[in-house]
Amino acid sequence: MKLQRLLSLLRQAIDQYQMIDDGDHIAIGISGGKDSLTLLWGLHHLQRFYPKKFALSAITVDLGLGNLDLEPVKQLCDEFQVPYEIVSTDIGKILFDVRKESNPCSLCAKMRKGALNQKALELGCNKIAYAHHRDDLIETVMMSLIYEGRFHAFSPFTVLDRTGLTVIRPMMLAAEADVKGFSNKYHLPVCKNPCPMDGHTRREYVKNLIRTLDQENPGLRDRLFHAVITGNLEGWPSPTEES
């Protein structure tokens, strides 16, 4: 995927769901993976010509697991002139050494989001951009059906009542395969995930399940995505045709 295509998908999602307003200060949650770095790259370049003016800050919540080299990410942020903050935590130690969690993902996500939100507020941000893409959306629906017995997915944007922050998901129209292609084409400084659960989660299981189902039923991903965006899910805003 070329930059022009990424910008088109970002703008389409942002405009359809009115994710960005004039004067926004948007924090980008940077894990160091391909998704968040693609979002950083895209929003930085969109910032140059988007009619609504917004500021960016980048934030990484370090779980304290070690072996996370963030220097290349810092260099990219410096190149883009995007302020970059690293929040050091003991989340990894708490999960794996103290609590010895066998299924730590849900609690880890909650703790990471708390640290990210706190830093975003300290920086004066009013919005946080997550790098969830189209495949994340589909996988979330499948996980909800399999493990919770309900048809549910995260919304294009969510207002967090406790903090007043708004979470936006500008990459929701981009497929993971396109994000991988973009990352490779532009040589993004992807960091290896140090989490010992990487590749052994429920989400990874569902990802592989959807891949198999899509191979056996071509077009399944497209149909699942269409079901989500047209399903009148609770908490989902109605898209607008305005640009």
Image (cartoon, grey):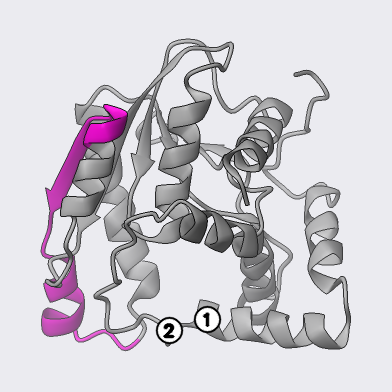
State left or right for residue 196 relative to residue 226: left
Q: Earlier in the sequence, mark 2 or mark 1?
A: 2
Check disc 1 and give the amino acid type.
Glu
Q: How many marks?
A: 2
Residue shown at 69% from the left, 26% from the top: 15
The residue tagged 2 is: 199
Vertical placement of 175 versus 242: above or below?
below
Residue shown at 55% from the left, 23% from the top: 20
State left or right for residue 217 relative to residue 137: right
Q: Is residue 195 magenta?
A: no
Name the quadrant of the C terminus.
top right
How packed mark 1 is, by other alpha carbons closer than 10 Å (few <14, some 14-19, many 20 or more), is few
Of 37 and 92, which appears nearest the observer? 37
Check disc 2 and give the amino acid type.
Gly
Of 126 and 25, which appears nearest the observer? 25
Residue 176: percent from left, percent from top: 60, 62
Vertical placement of 112 versus 42: above or below?
below
Residue 51 can be seen, yes or no: yes
How packed mark 2 is, by other alpha carbons closer than 10 Å (few <14, some 14-19, many 20 or more), is few
- Among the 4 quarters of the image, the one containing residue 14: top right
Residue 129 can be seen, yes or no: no
State left or right for residue 190 relative to residue 186: left
Residues at badges 2 and 1 in contact (C-beta under 8 Å)? yes
The residue tagged 1 is: 204
Residue shown at 47% from the left, 44% from the top: 39
The residue segment tinted magenta is 78-102
Of 18 and 50, which appears nearest the observer? 50
Residue shown at 33% from the left, 68% from the top: 107
